[in-house]
Image: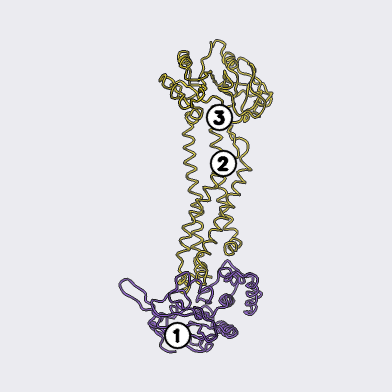
Chain colours: A yellow, B purple
Amino acid sequence: MFLALKELQRAKVRFGLLIAAVALLVFLILFQQSLQNGLLTSFVGAIRNQSAEVLVYRTDGRRILQGSVISPDLEAMVRSSGAAAEVARIGQGTFTVTPGEGGDGVPIETSILGYEDPGLGAPTTLVEGRLPEGPGEAVASDADAELGFGVGDTVTVLPGGLDITVVGLARDVQLNVTPTLFVTYDTYVQSVRSRNPDAGEPLPNVLALRAPPDVPADRLVDQVNGLSDELDTLTRADAADKAPGVAQVRQSFQVIFLLYGFVVPLVTGLFFLIITFQKASALTLLRAIGAPARTLLTSLLVQVVVVLGGGLLLGIGLYAALVRGRIGGIPLRFETTAVLVWTALLVAGGLLSSLFSARRVMALDPYAATTGAGVGS
Amino acid sequence: MNVNGASVPALSLQRVRKVYAMGDSEVVALDDVDLEVAPGEIVALVGPSGSGKTTLCSIAGAILSPTSGRVVVAGTDISGFNPKQLTAVRRDLVGFVFQSVNLVPFLTARENLLVVDEIGKRTGAPARARADQLLGELGLADRAKNLPAQLSGGQRQRVAIGRALMNDPKLVLFDEPTSALDSKLGMAVMELIQQEMKARGTAAIVVTHDERITRFCDRSVHMDDGRITKS
């Protein structure tokens, strides 16, 4: 400890720079983790955080809510099969909407998602207000509250001029990175007709199912998929995770995380290896005058822990301070789980990488001190 | 195993042999060497380069193990000691001043002395008092907070002497202690070594090829080709 702390004290700049480098990398990892989660939530949060545990798409809809259209015969097939305890419609479309007073008044593309049964499609993460109870009411994503989708704001669907009042806000319920409104199915139908008065009765995009008691969602999925090749039934989690683009986004970020996961221990390991080489003479001298290898290893480990700990604290502090608000409509937030997981991974990786330096320390031959080869001023 | 008492030699080497394997052949660095150093005695070990002086010193100081023979330091037979035990001998019984400048660069003069306590008994306050006392005796009280890079060559060597005395050793090994110093400073350092050793009754071996050094020692031992040729 004495040796470790004295060296840290005398080489503040050197160790400070390494701590700063580790902190920067930690910040980048955590920030990108938030970005990934924010991006995925903005794409499919409305699916992940709604109440229906099973969703039935039409196969040719390619798991895109708006692209899937359930025909009356398919709907009848599902309803008559008796596989689900309850079946309800969900409709979804993208509309041009003039936001409420809180916004800048510029029309904005908005997803409107209508559900027949609050237990089969309503948002589950209400943070303010209430669910819609009648026509012309909506729950909006809280990420869009400041854009004119706050509680009490009235938005207008263009071009028909249908007014919808926001009566509640839910967390993480965006769809396709657009402001999202959850409305009753009737309001959804009115929205479609407001935009196109000639439209007839719009067909549902997906069917929401509730499994009978004692029937797990997975079994219900298999049963409904067995009814027709035209039906693509998914659990809520799968519907979110298997939406087009989600896997690719996740995979891209995972490659980046993997690289960072290697870079931090590599930087730490190389740094300590270099300074172990640089101070080999002093370490050899210490071995020659009777310092046990264990003492020198402890000193090395203390320094590794100080560098990693300092870097993590600084990086997490920076992350906590800067990961607020939104980037291009994508909400960012402090991810506690990511912080804990990455802290454990980076500490383990850093300690593992310091094994190279530890091996070097163990290999020091005190005899080198007598030849001058390992001794310096 | 450890026998305390004034009559116990600080060092006893009996038929010590050190052989290095060099490919298929062997190099005999020490060839059946016998040497005894009494407590408080200062012995000059003189000889040309490659004569085995440093190897002898390294074996006496528990840095190397002999191929055969018996090595007894202050009554402790260390001949069969494992590396861990040898480390303890270096820490507790022996002091070293190496040929090159030999201080830890990121520690101050005082800390270079205190490190001996840190890697050993960790006595704390008594060690700090001893370090201050030694630095005072060596004329370095006002340099206690200086890093080695801020000290002159002679001052660094004096700090190294102080460090060698920190653990109150029975035997101090000086390997060419004046080789990095000019003649005048070298003689001053030797005078200091003589004073310090005699004042403490500590035995010392001074490895040198400079005959002028021998006048500061009680006797000279000459080496050549791994053998003691004159004692």
Answer whether residue A319 is visible to the viewer in this image: yes
SS for tag 1? strand
Check contact, mark 2 vs mark 3: CB within 8 A: no
Q: Give the amino acid at mark 1.
A: Leu
Q: How many marks?
A: 3
For the residue carrying disc 2, how many other residues have a C-alpha within 10 Å: few (<14), some (14-19), or many (20+)?
A: few
Q: Which mark is residue A45?
A: 3
Residue at 55% x, 50% y is A22
Q: Is residue A135 left or right of residue A45?
A: right
Residue named by callout 2:
A337
Question: Which residue extends farthest left?
Answer: B24
SS for tag 2? helix
**Disc 2 to disc 1, how far (Cα)?**
68 Å
Residue named by callout 1:
B35
Q: Nearer the viewer, residue A364 or B122?
A: B122
Q: A10 above or below B178? A: above
Q: A6 above or below A221? A: below
Mark 2 or 3, which is nearer the eye?
2
- Quarter that holds the C terminus of chain A: bottom right
Check contact, mark 2 vs mark 1: CB within 8 A: no
Q: Nearer the viewer, residue B9 or A297?
A: B9
Check contact, mark 3 vs mark 1: CB within 8 A: no
Q: Chain of mark 2?
A: A
Q: Chain of mark 1?
A: B
